[in-house]
Image (cartoon, rainbow, N blue to C red):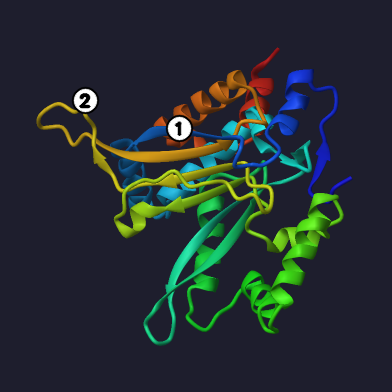
Amino acid sequence: MRADGTRLRGLTPIVQALPYIMPRRYDAQNWASDMIDEDIVRAYIRQKRREGRRVTHMSVLAAAYYKAALENPKLNCFVVNRRIYRRNHFCFSFVLLKKRADGTPDETALKIFLRPDDTVFSISERVQEAIDRNSEAAHNNRTDRFANFAFAVPGLARVVFWLVYHLDLHGLLPRKIIDLSPFHTSLFITNLASINTSCIHHHCYEFGTTSVFICMGKPVRRPDALPGEKGKAMPLGVVMDERIATGVEYSRFFAAFTRYLRMPEVLESRLDGAQELRAEAAVLP
């Protein structure tokens, strides 16, 4: 049994066969494009800030994705060594852009773990805390320190990453290493809108367990916007591993994901819906 997941049993023959037909993640990548209604999300963010609550595009997207994934758990699965696993936690990774002491740009990867009792507010706070801790030019997080160690001795990096890859392949990678790796994640997000760059479709990494990668591009005017309307939309580039879920399951997931992005206020309650269930039970005779 892997430290980060449990192998799925009882799958249909065609689903079990897919990892053999497409053994590599880049074999099984599907690309899709979607649009966030930027006017709705931006109005929501501004309203929350007027109320003294900090919310960002990334936290809204992550909360909507997680809520939809809780309702459609196949989206939190991954494939390793031709086996399909259900992840025993949910996390998302993203890249933080910062500057070195000499002014040159630098990047570090961060990973945020989420819980069913999270809300868009708690996710926002956790993301901001991680950004604040890692924004200093001199700061290196545990992932950076591990990478620095691997590259400290010539030839060591090849041995370290070969060992990590093969331990992972056979389900022997320790949970501490999995938690360090931004590539072992439920979702990877890149926010190119923050650097005023157009949307791209970013590949899912073969190394690790990333099954879905979402890119947020700079907002554009909607083609159907009427004269005088703001009519802004944020394009999303989505790349997904088709082996973890059927087309119907992906369709149901993205319908829920899109619905929550259009109604971000529903993300203010527990994302697993427990509050709503308790409220309904309280009014039953």
Whether residue 12 appears in this view of the structure is no
Horizontal relation, residue 219 to residue 88: left or right: left
Q: Residue furthest left?
A: 227
Give the distance between the C-alpha atoms of the residues marked 1 and 2, in whole angstroms: 20 Å
- The kind of secondary structure element at disc 1 is strand
Residue, x 63% and y 47% (percent of image)? 210
Give the x, y percent position of residue 248.
59, 18
- Kind of residue at badge 2: Asp
Disc 1 residue crowd, few under 14, some 14–19, many 20+, Cα 10 Å: few
| Label annotation for residue 193 | none
Query: Quarter of the image containing the C terminus?
Result: top right
- Of callouts 1 and 2, the N-terminal one: 1
Q: Helix, strand, or loop for circle 2?
A: loop
Q: Is residue 92 visible?
A: yes
Q: Which residue is mark 2?
A: 224
In the depicted view, which residue is nearer to us: 218 or 150? 150
Residue tagged 1: 32
